[in-house]
Amino acid sequence: MADATGNVDAKNYGIGVPVEKKAFFLKGLDHYDWGIKDRMSRIFDSRSGNAVMLAFDHGYIMGPTSGLERIDLGILPLVEYADCLMCTRGVLRSCIPPEVNKPISLRVSAGTTVLTELNDECLMDIQDAISLNASAMAAMVSVGGKYEATTIRNLTKLVDLGMKYSIPVLGVTAVGKSLVRDARYLGMASRVCAENGATFVKTYYCEEGFAKVVAACPVPIVIAGGKKIPEDQALQVAYNAINDGASGVDMGRNVFQAGDPIAMIKAVRAVVHDGEKPDKAFQLYNDLKK
């Protein structure tokens, strides 16, 4: 208990000095609550406004793909260079030491594998995401696919829960075999995620019109790395996406399947956070290679 006597009277009220009002550094999130902003601030660097996310959740639909046979050998050496880890709860608990203290974008939708029709998914219990201290919850959304209604319903349910517990939701746009990854489709899929409450969106990059995709999405977009391509091309894609307004990358195979994964994620960071040109970043990659 504070003493009732002997206290110094308060006097520094700052009368006449207006309270400073700051806009949040990520677009579209000014009116979200403190908890959402706090978690998003862990994922995204406030100086660059961007994020380098490391995705290694592929196993939940693909099994032990190349580079992910041993998470402890293939992924743990990369963790310190990532701003955020995108993974499943099984791998998180079994393979990622809690003391790495990295924000987690937790894959919370699951249901089918590449052996069947993808995206007929369900959601894990919100309590598990809370127990794992997730900084974001990621769910797949299949706009235009067979399970469009199911996956959009999952997203809306997740957003309701996320708003209740102040956990951001990442809407991950899924592209089926019959759908074209062009600006018209990606723009629609990203906007649908945002309209249904996703705090940020993960989608693919397209060479033509990607700036329009970003402009029409009222919340931040991070790009998916997609299938493995040569390192110089992956760095070019990352640069183009950031230059077109994306707020980061969520790369997996183009990092952990690179000739030198540590050199690659450092080169990606140079592009995403420092605005390094692709040729300079590729030179950095070659200089850092073991």
Image: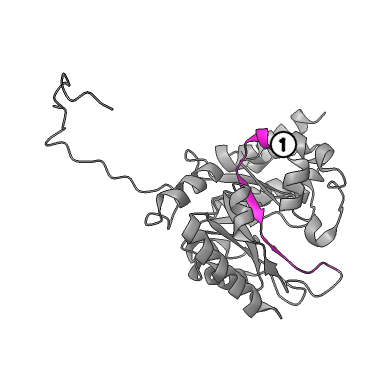
Could one spot residue 2 in this view of the protein? yes
Q: Which residue is mark 1?
A: 97
Q: 4 left or right of 141?
A: left
Task: Looking at the picture, tell me which residue is in the foreground, 169 or 225.
Answer: 169
Q: Position of residue 216 (x, y in %)?
A: 48, 66
Q: 37 left or right of 130?
A: left
Q: Is residue 188 above or below residue 15?
A: below
Q: 80 left or right of 9?
A: right
Amino acid on which the number 1 mark rests in the picture: Pro
| Stretch in magenta | 98-114
Q: Position of residue 45 (x, y in %)?
A: 52, 40
Report if residue 251 lies within the magenta region.
Answer: no
Residue at image location 47% in from the left, 40% down from the top: 46
Residue at image location 47% in from the left, 38% down from the top: 47
Q: Position of residue 135 (x, y in %)?
A: 57, 48
Task: Looking at the picture, tell me which residue is in the foreground, 208 or 47.
Answer: 47
Of all residues, the one furthest to the top in this rendering is 6
Could one spot residue 259 in this view of the protein? no
Q: Position of residue 9 (x, y in %)?
A: 13, 24
Residue at image location 77% in from the left, 74% down from the top: 177
Q: Is residue 146 above or below residue 276?
A: below
Residue at image location 65% in from the left, 53% down from the top: 106
